[in-house]
Each structure stands twice: as structure tokens, then as C-alpha cells.
Amino acid sequence: MTIQKKQTAKRAAAGMLTAAVILSMAGCGSSGQSAGNQGGADVAGGQTGDGKPTITFMTTSFYGTELKNENSEEVIRRYEDYTGIHVDWKWEADDTYKEKLGLTLMDKENMPMIIAGSSVITANVVDAARKGAFWDLAPFLEDKESYPNLSQANKGVLKSFTVDGQVIAIYRARELGRMGFSYRTDWAENLGLSAPKTVEDVYNMLYAFTYNDPDGNGQDDTYGLEMTKYVGPLDIIQTWFGCGNEWVEKDGKLIPVHQTEEFREALRWMRKIYEDGLIRKDWATVDSGTFGDACKKGEAGAFIDVMDSAKRIWNYYEQNDIRSVVDPDTTATMTLVGPIAEKTLATPGHNGYYLITKAGAKTEEDVKNCLRYLDRMCDDEMLVLADYGLEGITYDINEQGEIVLRNELDVTQTPQVGLNQSIPYIPKLKSTNPALFRRPSEIAQDEAYAVNREVAVMNPAVGYLVSSPVNAEVGTDIEQIIDDARTQYICGQIDDAGFDAAAKQWLDRGGDRLIEEINQMYQADSSK
Amino acid sequence: MGNQAKKVTWKQALYAHRWLYIMIIPGVLYMVIFNYLPMGGLVMAFQEFSPYNGEGLFGPFLESPFVGLNVFRKFFTGPDFLMLLKNTLSISIASLIFYFPAPIILALLLNELGGKYFKRITQTMVYIPHFISWVIVAALTQQMFSTTDGFVYQLMEQIFGRGNGPDVMSNPGLFVPMLIGQSMWKETGYGTIIFLAALAGVDVELYEAAKVDGANRWQRMWHITLPAIRGTIVIMLILKVGSLLNTGYEQIFLMQNSMNRGVSEVFDTYIYTKGVVNGNYSLATAAGMFKSVVSMIMVLGANKLAKMCGESGFY
Amino acid sequence: MSKTKEKGTKIKRSPGDQAVQVLIYLLVAAFALVTILPFIYVVAGSFATERELTERAFFLIPKTISTNAYQYIFRTGDAVRGLFNSILVTVVGTMINMFFSCTLAYPLSRPYFKGRTGIMNMVIVTMLFSGGMVPSYILIANILKMKNSYLALWLPTAINAFNMIIIKNYFQGIPMELEEAARMDGSNDLLTFVKIILPLSKPVLASVGLFYAVSHWNSYFNAMLYISDSKKEVIQIVLRRIIFLTSSVATEGGFDWGAFGTPPQKAIKMATTVVATVPILLVYPFIQKFFTQGVMVGSVKG
């Protein structure tokens, strides 16, 4: 390159650089007005032009297009009219939400009124709660008149969000009875098996699926239970043996389930099915993202997890035209059994929570507005709006009065996308009037839920674990010890002595202090 | 120009090279603002830090209780520390011995190639894996080495016998080799770039002259090629030694499971779990600071060693 | 003028040496094959049906070609806009990087520069110590108010100390005679830098420029943390979101794909890899010519 060209190139580069810097400055300036940037402490508690009170709401953004699509304005108008509240949304990307949560707690000037969180509350949040960051919602929730929906919140689940006696969050409801046992209908039919009821029935079914050629192709290419490194199914199986859900009450005390004899029985059973070849030998290394694939591929026939995953396998057979091995004119289906030995694992009953901050919601009036929004959004009309959209645009009503989705728009383009992130779904998980039209697989799923709900085993210690400092300190670490030991035992890497050693390690690493602390809280808890 | 007189005042030196001082302003400003200011956050390592303490943005830093070296003490005496140290070191040292030479060797081989198109094409091919995310690499590894249906595993079984193939996914003894293998696949090609750039500065006529003098391939490599990249190798080595306690978190996090956790839990995964997921900023900062101090000692030590051997090092 | 190595040098090779040459070719070819096969699988998979990906473990050519995954990715303008944004961020970012890095590196490479050791120490410290994400976030978002601006992606990472040191060392390696000759011709430090040193540094500028560019292209964490305007998203964010939306995890969390039909999850994962990497891959062949030997020839003479 000649010197002149170099000079020109440099000048051009400098010019571009300046231009770019100016452009981004402009971008910087305009971002002050964008919905994503909450500099507006003055907006909190204020009024909008049409007199509605305003609340600020921080929640997870999965799509990037939340409430910004065509017809979204109509959706916004509807919920504002219905609830009488204007919402200033603060959407934060899911990938960095945890980081953002911590950072938001640091910035008291710009604290939103409602902060959504996912799964359980973390040590950060508990600590902030102890320092008075959030309103105690217990007195508000007693008010059945003002909050007909929220006041029906399940007391047991609320325990997970009680710190030092204060209810610091409303939970986002999730089906309790989600987990259970399912199997491939046509394989069972082919082998003359009926729906299993006991653990032994399950064993026989798994054995038959592995060795009796359920798909009738003369080849030894099938096995019983699908397993990946995700150990949820093991927790479910354990409940069949009666050992409980993480903690169980014995003789008036709470102990961790791995100390029970029933747990050891379950362990031995699980090891047996491994040794007998009813699950794949390298299950502990398989990517959990592929869970469900073995059933879809026709390699495995039994599936233990949430019922809607089984439903999804059923849908896969339908969509991909996988034929039944007994009746080639129909597609394969899954039978969603649910509980075995009349027991199954309960979910925590929640899938996230909503905190109401004192720095954001400065007056009781603000709190009431927040709660009013959350409560009214649980009514049928709003559930339909948030879950299904607008009639004539995203769905129609058929002659039976059921909602039939049009499925024309991509999820990220629907007018209502994101709205359901702000609904607690208490007491109903979906609208019943009008209700959604359901396919056979969905009907089966709902029925299984109902059956599961009756017998699902809950974790009695869930409320105490949240407020326990010992749990915050060592909880996940020591849980890992037992999980790893369980896997190693099943695969034959260790035996009973090895598991005993792991159990002892659990105690030594803080487990004994945990038991003590949990039981202290258990005894002191008058409402149990 | 000759040697400058030793007695040059500061002012004179500054003026004589005023452009250099002006040039350096952006860089120094950058470091002060974006590197040194945030270093204030290191106080978290000495505090029981909680985001909700105090008022305003700096409140948590000012109000969180000062606990001196408590956090460090807990970290060092905790049950995990030795295991983390052992795991981290075994991975780093293995990486130093096996992975470090790979890009150099490949660069040397590429340098020996004559065909222009063959060279260009293979160079582009080997550098592709760098752009494939660890998520995909982990998924592919599992697919290939699965003891049930991994096709590479099945190939290995042909050689070693049924059931005797290398179970890289769950065998703790194979975890480190598996990690190194992945790194070699993914990063060797990209790693050659820096050496190839250094080699581009070599005068072609030196090679011609050497050939005329009857030097064979290995002599040419020893006397011309290697010296050309020696400086670069030394720098990379110093840096690698300085990163002894860094393993990166993503690759290991993806390949961890119940079976190999005893060897796969390292400082970086620990810091991620405690710092981000559990929100224990104090511990994460303290652990990070520990790593930094060790890094600094290693880098300065290695640099001094390099200087003693006559290399230029960092300065 | 620069010469490239001529094909078929006139010196005869011994048979032993020829064998070694062949061996070298084989080794390189073998390694290249090993590195590229998985990528071919990813490309093939991106054009395959979901069913084939579920059933077949590994293949180089799909039995049925399907562009569903790509249709899905490009069905909205997000991906295209993401690509443009990424290009903008990468190009401008790299220029900023090179400007800051070179201007810092040059003075440090001059032995007569007073304050050299002091500033070099400063640099080394920044390489080793860091306050972490929290203070950086407060600085960038709250104090400097760069939230939602590309400045947050360009300025905080303006200098990578290691890259800067690479450049500095290269500058140091340029023979002093050249500088002295220029000085005798009346050139000052700035002109020497621009007219003599930089043109001779093409290999290092090209390679470090590539390093910076790749780093910008691949980065997503900072973009995720600081950019909230969906129109400003870079391609990695767009793609990550697509992968998340179509993963099983998404369906766990309470929103149901059943309503709107299942997208081809595995194929999409592969297609996003292809879309994310192909653009930056194409840069390397253009840079390669700077790595050709003999770029330095003629610079010392006269």
C-alpha cells in the first residue's frame, strides 16, 4: 500500500470512527426514553394521563418482543381496563436475569415495585428480605374481598416464601401433580401387559420391553426405561417405595429421605434394573437435553417425568406418523399412568414468585395496586387474553364454546406474548370458561394430573429450608454428595459401604447442623 | 544519531518525544477508567457483602461489614479447597505439557508446506473448530463416545474389545485426557495464527541461502524457523504458566457429571456456582483474588527466568 | 518487492526428505480432516429433518434435505438485523481496539521512552487483577450511563493486554536502523510510527485485528447485560434466544409449544451454529495473504 493510500485509509477510518461514536451517542441518548431503562423513580406511584395508578414490574424476557407486536396495544388496553392499572414493564433477558436480580437489589433508587423471580428464592433475596427489602404480604392475603383469587393461595406452598414468619412473595403456581409414570401403549398391548399399579408391575413391564421384543421386529433393539443424567426420575421412583420427598417425618422429627430404609430399598431396586440391563449402561453421561429421544426413536418404552413431556412424545408420534406396532393404521400413543403404588412426587407447586419491594412500592397504596393487578389477572377473562390472545386474531370459538387456536402466528409474534409472565395463576392454572379445545393427548395429560394431585407426596421441610442459613451455606453442596453417591451406587461404582460413607460425609459437611436447624423450626412452627 | 547524552532532563525528554506521550494517553486513560476504577470492587473479598446494604450505588460497598481475611480463611480451610487445587492443577499442567506444543508443531508443519492452495485450504479448515461453541462440542463428544451407541466408541471397541473402549464420559481417570483432547481439536488451528504471523516476518532469502549452503530441512528449522518464533513462544509460555489456576468454566461445566465430579470440580466452576448462582459475591471475589495473586507470582517468576535465559520477556 | 516462496525449488530433495515431505502433507491433511468432519456434520444436520437427526447418530449427507431450520431462523427480520448489528459492532469495535492497542504499544516498544517500565507494570496488573462483573456493571451502566449503547461493547474492552503486548513485541523486533534512517530524514515520532512502523507490521496487525474481530463477533454476555433494545441485538443473542425457545427447557417452564407447533429443535441448533460462524470464517482467507512469507523482504535494504 502506498503512503498516500495509507493516509486516505487512515482518514477514512478516523471518519468512520467519529461517525460511529456519534451514532452510538445518539443511541445512548435515546435509550433514556426506551421502556427498558427505568430511570423513572418519579413514575413509581404516579398517575398516567388517564388517571390510572401505575406500577413498575420487572420480569423475564424470553422473546425480545414482549407486548411489542401488532395488536399488542389492544392487549394492553384490555388488561389496563380490566385491572384498572397501568404497568411500566421492565423486561430483562433470561440468560442474565440472575445477575440482573442481584444488581437490581443494589440500586435502591430505581427499584421496580414488583420483581419476578424463577424457581426458589436465593440466598441473596433471603438476605435482602431480612434487611426489610420486601413487604410482608400475609395481612393483605387475608383480605378475601379485595383479593378473591390470591387469598386462595396454598398455605403449604406459601411456606416456601416465608422468611422469619413473613410472607415475602406471591408464588407463580404450577401443577402439583405433574410427575408420574408413562409407557408406550402399543408395546404393552403387543405383549399383553396392562397398566402397572405396583412396583413389581413396573419391573415386569421394563423387563418385557427389554427382552420380549415389544415392537415385534425380531431384533434385540429395545429396552425398558429411558434415563439421562437428569435424575428427576429417580426422585419419583423413590416415592413409590414410601420414602418421601427430600425430607420426611419420622417419630415427630424431620429427617432427610436418604436416611430411611425405604430409600435403600429404592436404591437396590434401581441398581437391579441397571444390572438387568433395563436402562442404558451409560445413562449418567447422556445429555439431559435429549431426554425423550429414546422413546421417540422407539428405543425405550417407559418414561418417568412430567406428564406433559410424555404428552409431547405422544404428539411426536402423531406429527411424524410413527405407527403403532399392533395396529398399523393408527399412530403410536403413550399411556399416562401417573402414580405407582398410589404415590408420586409432587412438584414444589410453584414456578417462580413475585416480590413486592419497599424501595419501589413506597406506600401501602402502591402495594394494593400491585396486588390488585396480580389478583385480577387470575380471572378467566385475563387468563384467556394472556394464554390464547385475541378472538378473531389468534383464536376462534367453536360450537361447543371451546377455544380453538389458529396457530398462524409464531409465538414471538403474537400480540399477547410475555403477558403471562406476570400472572400468578392462583387458584386456576388455566381458564375454565371458556376452555381450550383439547386433543386426546392433552385430555390424558389433564386426567393424569388430577390423579397425581390426590396422592402426590410433598416436602414437609420446604418452608424451613428457605429461611435456613445452614441450608444457604451448604445446602446445594451436600445435596450433590448424595445425588452423586446414588448415581454411583446404581452403576455399581460403590456399594452399601460406599453409600454409608457418603451419608456420613453429608452429616459431616453440615448435614447434622441442617437437621438440627430444620427441626428447631419444625417444632416452633405452630401452624403445621 | 549515536548515543544520547545521559544528562537529559525530564522536560527535555518529554518534549523530544512529545508525540509518544500524547499517543499513550488514550491507552492509559482506558486502563484507569475501565480496569483500575472497578478494582475498587475487590473490597468485596474482605467484606460480608450483600447487595441490599446501605444507600445508593456504593452503599453495599461502604456499608457491608468488614471481616478482614475471614472470607479467605473460610475458603482455604474449607473442605473443597485442596480438591479444587488438585483438580485445577492437574488440568493446567497436562494442558501445558500436551496442549501447549500443539499449535507450534502444527505451525511448523504448515510452514513446510509448499502447495499454496493446499496450505490455504488446510489452514482455513483447522481454524474452524474455534468458532464452534462448547455447547455443541460437548454434545458432539457425548454422541461420539457414548458407550451405548457412540460411533467412535464402537470403533474403539473394534480395537480394544467389547466393553473395553475408552469411557471418556464417565471414567474419572479419562476426564483430563478428554478435556485436553477437546481443547486440542478446538484450539490448535486458531493457535497457529500467532506463530504463522511471526513466521511471515522471516526473510525468504535466508531459506534460499541456507539451502544453497546444504542445510537440510531440520537444520533450516532449527536455525531459521524456530529462532523466528522463539520470542513468541516465550511470551505464550509465560502467559500459560501465569494462567495455572485458570481453566475456564464453560467447557468443564458442560462435561461434568456425577461420575467424574471428584476430578472435574475446579476453581472456575466453583466460583461460578457460588458467585452467580448463589449470589455469594464475597467468596467469588476472594477466590478470584487468590487466583490473581498466584498468577502474578507465576508470571513475574517466569518472566525473570526467561530474562535469565536471554529472552526478552514482557518488558 | 516481496516475493512469495516459489513452487518446486530447484534444489534436489533426497528420497528420505521426500518421504518426510509426504508425511508432513499426510499429517496436516489428517488433522484438517479431523477438525472439519464434525463441522460438516453440523452443516449437514442443519439441512436435515428433525426425525433424521433424532434417529441417525452421525452423517455427512442428509437423506432428506429440509430447509425448515433456516426458514425458522429467518422467518422474522431478527436474524438479518442481528447479522448487520454484529458486523457493525465488530468492524467499529476492531478499529477502536487497534487504535488504542497500537498507540499504547508503540511508545512502550521504544527503549528510550521514559516511564516505560512503570506503564508496562500497570498493564500487567490489569491482566491479572479484576474487580469482577459487579463494579464494572456499576461503572458502565450507572456512572457512565452507557446502558443500551454500543459504547458499552466497544470501550470497556478497548484493549486486551495480551494482544497489546504481542503488537509491542513485534514493534520492538523491527530493526532500529529504519527508525534512525527516518529520523535523519527529519521525521518525528508520530510520522515514523505511521509511515514506517505500521506498514511493516502487517502480519501482526492482521492477526491481532483478527483476534479482536473474532472476540467481538462471538461475544454475547456483555451484549446481553447492557443492550435491552431488541433492534440493537447482535446475532449471537438472536441465535441464543432461538435455541432457548426451541429447547426442552423452555417447555418445562410453563409455556407450551403444543399450541403453536413444535419447531425442529435439533436442526435449529445446528443451523444457528452455521449462521453464527460462517460470516466470520470468511474473513480468514482474506487475512491469510498477510501471513505469506517474505512480506518483510526489501524493507531493510536501502
Image: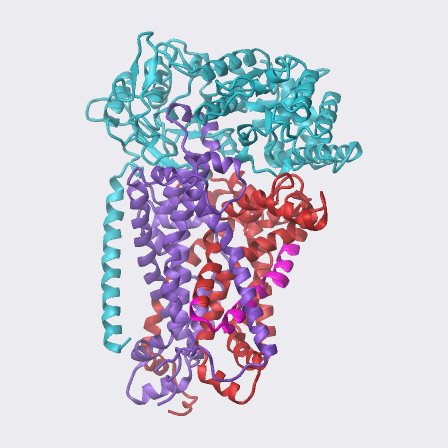
- Residue C182 image offset from top left, x and y in percent: 32, 86
The extreme top residue here reads A400
Q: How many marks?
A: 0
Vertical position of residue B223 compared to residue A443: above or below? below
Q: Quadrant of residue A358?
A: top left
For this view, does A291 lie left or right of residue A44?
right
Residue C187 counted in the magenta span: no
| Residue in the foreground of this view, choosing between A317 and A44 | A317
Q: Is residue A520 visible?
A: no
| Residue in the foreground of this view, choosing between A260 and C267 | C267
Q: Is residue C270 visible?
A: yes
Q: Quadrant of residue A59?
A: top left
Question: Which colour denotes chain B?
Answer: red
User: Which contiguous range is marked in magenta?
Assistant: B89-117
- Residue B63 image offset from top left, x and y in percent: 48, 43
Q: Which chain is purple?
A: C
Quarter holding the N terminus of chain A is bottom left
Question: Which colour denotes chain A?
Answer: cyan
Residue B100 counted in the magenta span: yes
Q: Residue at x 69, y 51 (%)?
A: B159
Magenta: predominant secondary structure element?
helix
| Residue in the foreground of this view, choosing between B157 and A145 | B157
- Residue C65 image offset from top left, x and y in percent: 40, 40
Q: Residue at x 58, y 43 (%)?
A: B142
- Residue C16 image offset from top left, x and y in percent: 61, 77
